[in-house]
Image (spheres, rainbow, N blue to C red):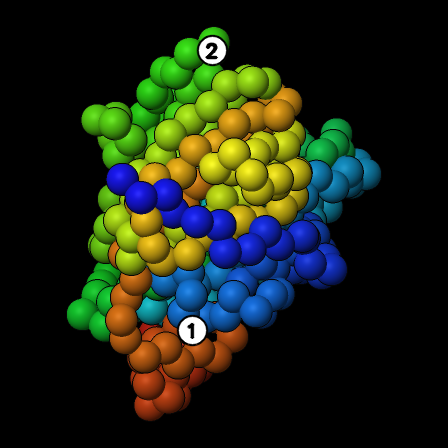
């Protein structure tokens, strides 16, 4: 197989606050020149690098807000996050857990620091991805998947390293997440000096975020902690070697070759659909959430 070449390694962008609980670096679509289409089906990546929060009796976070036309995927590395939505779903994720919410036809949700974590304070580190839905599935009923670390696919490598599979498949090991289009999403836990091989179709959009440690990609490209690597749409094979104990979020997927129209929390195909989403939200069709 031909090597999938590194197009660029991006340093973390200037951080901004989402609500009062999540300090994030946006790698796409707005934080860099990656844009809205280049990592399709992934539309957005907000990375909450390690941030220490002081104890508080009032949980920090983001209040009730709407979404339509895509999915939110929240991956926890440190800290605990609680979720509630207008479809009646709720859950708490901690280290290694994932919340996968399909907004689909429309939903209200809120995310905030879990009460016990809020009272004790500590380090929060999270990733949130927005995964676009194809036009034929934009109005699918809302759905919620709470994916516990214990239920992830686990593919053992040498020296205690492993590939944790959230979605898709790695060398026969499958992840628990249901997806509407082909998506591969892994956490690679690599011991210092260990290496892992990956293979993705040439035209699938592929990236890697170094959550912990530092790695060398394809023998030449250095990617330190908190940096995002974007791969060119050529070749299939990638080699990642850990320069120190590392955790790397690996994402790859088949692009959705459709127009994108966005307004705040809505990701649709046309401006008319955006206007309809706003009207439906204002008329209460997304449900209620205190």
- Residue 8, given in percent of the width and then of the height, sits at 55, 55
Circle 1 — which element? Answer: strand
Measured along the vertical axis of the image, is residue 159 above or below residue 182? above
Residue pictured at 25% horizontal, 44% vertical: 178
Q: Are marks 1 and 2 in contact (CB under 8 Å)?
A: no
Locate residue 24 relative to residue 232 in the image: left or right: right
> Residue 76, located in which quarter of the rendered image?
top right
Image disc number at residue 160: 2
Q: Earlier in the sequence, mark 1 or mark 2?
A: 2
Q: Position of residue 138 (x, y in %)?
A: 26, 69
| 70 displayed left or right of 48 | left
Q: Residue furthest top?
A: 159
> Residue beneath label 1, please?
266
The picture quadrant where one finds residue 285 is bottom left
Residue that extends furthest to the right in the rendered view of this protein: 54
Q: In front: 216, or 33?
A: 216
**Residue lying at 36% horizontally and 16% vertically, measured from the top left:** 156
Above or below, 150 relative to 260: above
- The picture places residue 279, in percent across and down from the top left corner, at 39, 86
Disc 1 or disc 2, which is closer to the eye? Answer: 2
Q: Residue at x 37, y 62 (%)?
A: 40
Compute the Cα span from label 1 to label 2. 42 Å
Q: Is residue 171 shown left or right of residue 29?
A: left
Residue 30 visible, this angle: yes
**x, y percent for residue 29:** 52, 67
The disc at residue 216 is none
Q: Residues within 10 Å of mark 2 (few under 14, many from 20)?
A: few
Q: Secondary structure at mark 2?
A: helix
Q: Residue at x 58, y 58 (%)?
A: 27
Dot 1, crowdedness within 10 Å: few (<14), some or many (≥20)? many
Q: Quadrant of residue 211?
A: top right
């Amino acid at each position: 197989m031909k090597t999938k070449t590194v197009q660029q390694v991006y340093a973390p962008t200037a951080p901004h606050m989402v609500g009062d609980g999540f300090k994030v670096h946006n790698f796409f679509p707005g934080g860099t020149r990656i844009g809205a289409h280049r990592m399709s089906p992934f539309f957005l990546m907000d990375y909450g690098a390690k941030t220490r929060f002081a104890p508080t009796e009032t949980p920090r976070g983001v209040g009730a807000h709407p979404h339509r036309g895509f999915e939110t995927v929240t991956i926890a590395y440190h800290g605990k996050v609680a979720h509630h939505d207008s479809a009646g779903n709720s859950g708490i994720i901690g280290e290694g857990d994932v919340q996968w919410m399909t907004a689909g036809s429309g939903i209200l949700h809120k995310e905030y620091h879990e009460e016990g974590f809020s009272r004790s304070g500590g380090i929060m580190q999270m990733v949130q991805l927005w995964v676009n839905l194809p036009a034929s599935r934009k109005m699918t009923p809302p759905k919620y998947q709470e994916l516990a670390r214990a239920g992830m696919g686990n593919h053992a490598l040498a020296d205690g390293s492993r590939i944790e599979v959230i979605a898709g498949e790695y060398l026969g090991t499958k992840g628990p997440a249901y997806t509407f289009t082909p998506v591969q999403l892994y956490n690679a836990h690599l011991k210092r000096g260990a290496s892992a091989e990956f293979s993705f179709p040439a035209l699938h959009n592929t990236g890697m975020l170094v959550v912990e440690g530092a790695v060398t990609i394809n023998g030449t490209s250095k990617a330190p902690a908190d940096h995002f690597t974007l791969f060119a749409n050529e070749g299939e094979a990638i080699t990642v070697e850990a320069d120190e104990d590392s955790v790397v979020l690996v994402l790859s997927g088949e692009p959705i070759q459709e127009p994108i129209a966005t307004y705040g929390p809505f990701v649709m195909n046309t401006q008319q659909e955006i206007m309809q989403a706003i009207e439906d939200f204002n008329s209460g069709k997304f449900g209620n959430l205190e």
